[in-house]
Amino acid sequence: MTRSRWTWLWIALLLAAECARPKAAPTRRLPVGDGIWFEDGMGESDSEVENTIVRAGISWVFYPACRVAYGEGWNATPVPPPPRPFAHLPVFLVVSSNEGSGGAFPQGDSSLAALDNAIWLAVKTAVQDSRRYGTIGGVHLDLPFAAGEEAAYAKLVAGLRKKMPSTILLSLSLRFTPATPPSDGLKALLQSCDGLLAFVAGIGSLADPVATDSLEKSWWAGFAPAARGTWTSAGGENRGPLPEFVLARLSNDTRVKFLQDLALKDTSDASYTLVPREAVSLPGYSFQAGDHLNFHQPIPSDVLYELGAGIAGRRFVRGRVLSLPGRSEADRILTLEAMAQVLAGKPSLVAMHVTAEAGRGSVDVDVENVSPHPSIMSATSNWVEVEIPNGGIREVQTGGFDRFEVFGPDRNPVTLGRATAVRFYETLVSGHEKIDRARILLRGAPPQDCCTVHYHVLSASGQEVTSEAPVPTPEKK
């Protein structure tokens, strides 16, 4: 046999061996970049959301498709699609559930099959109606599971993976620190999905970035800066969870007593209690006097730090995902606009515009935060002070501020008639907030050199913002 014939024979054998080799599953990895997760969807008025996201360099959007719950069997309740499809960003459809839904994993194969069917029906419907979302790039499972339940979860994920188009990614939330080295169940779970979204900042159990990276699986770092609350009636009845917008709306309400837990303890969150002094209503809620609204909020400065430094140097991290509560900016303390600026590398600082106009017998104080960034929540750290050198104060109208205090020339508290300075306090200075005008009424005209204004605000980043400016004197007539 000639050399050329031997050559062709070897080629034929190699081709045959290659064809007989089992086909490996296609390798899918999470894309690189940052994402935004709208936990509760979006409202009809959010027409500029995508422009805000694109300007911040965001790469994709997480949007709720359904929420699964166990009642008389497993049910998946669809979430309304966005008011308009995303034109420029791929969408990950999110399947979420409450904490009680995690009971599926220890219940056996029949429960897993029912959960699989409920999820797949909702996901298939959303994918078939993809024009209402835009380009669908993946499905994300945000189902609660604990250490020891990974093997059962892996069966569920593997079953869903087989049903989904190969072009669609499948990712999972991780909200605890995985064991190292990983268990066989966790290895099976990692093989069944395309990547993880490991929450490293927020309320509740969190994943450790070092341990997550040691799994050698592509992952995003998740950040959930929202406050979470619980409602206890005056009679001690548990009335259920509360969203962040309740804290944002009531923290500056004079009908509600604001209490901050100042206990000296090592904690990653701040604790607040709101107690209505009288009946107070918000959309979807009616609170009575004496109810206790208890909230835990991740310390904003810690979240903002972790966004920049917490995942530095991790080999397998692909980017960051910011989870936002509520359906509009009014429902959030750290808003999309503010966090988009942070993701783009801009500082998180309050920008106060304070003016005080001296009239014939009064001084009007106007305050506006011209930045999207909020302050921290504090009964004492955020204030505006007006000096009235000659005194003569007869009344103080707080306007939109929470409360006021008065001081004498020696900076000690005094009665109103002896006061030469008025300090107005605001518990939370929200982004773009314009505080209703406060007024200081005097017994006579303010002096020519009136008045000096000071302010102090502690930004959510932990940085102080202070300034002072003279008040324009009234024109002589």
Image (cartoon, helix red, strand yellow):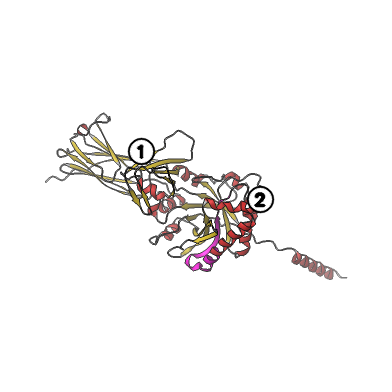
Q: CA distance from mark 2 to mark 1?
A: 49 Å
Can residue 449 be seen here? Answer: no
Task: Report the number of discs.
Answer: 2
Give the image location of residue 443, x and y in percent: 15, 38
Does label 2 or label 1 sit earlier along the sequence? 2
Work out whether 115 lies above or below 471: below
Residue where numbered disc 2 is placed: 185
**Label for residue 381?**
1
Q: Which residues are magenta?
A: 123-145
- In the depicted view, which residue is nearer to us: 257 or 181? 257
Horizontal side of residue 138 vs 252, given as left or right: right
Seen at 46% across and 41% down, the residue is: 269
Asked if residue 216 lies in the magenta stretch, the reply is: no
Q: Nearer the viewer, residue 117 or 94?
A: 117
Q: Amino acid at mark 1?
A: Ser
Indicate the amino acid at tag 2: Gly
Q: Residue 440 vs residue 12: left or right?
A: left
Residue 101 in the image, given as x and y percentages of width and height: 55, 53
From this view, report whether residue 105 is shown above or below residue 129. above
Q: Is residue 133 magenta?
A: yes
Q: Quadrant of residue 3?
A: bottom right
Q: Residues within 10 Å of mark 1 (few under 14, many from 20)?
A: some
State yes or no: discs 2 and 1 in contact (Cβ < 8 Å): no
Q: Name which quarter of the figure residue 52 lies in.
A: bottom left
Who's the residue at 49% across and 45% down the image?
203
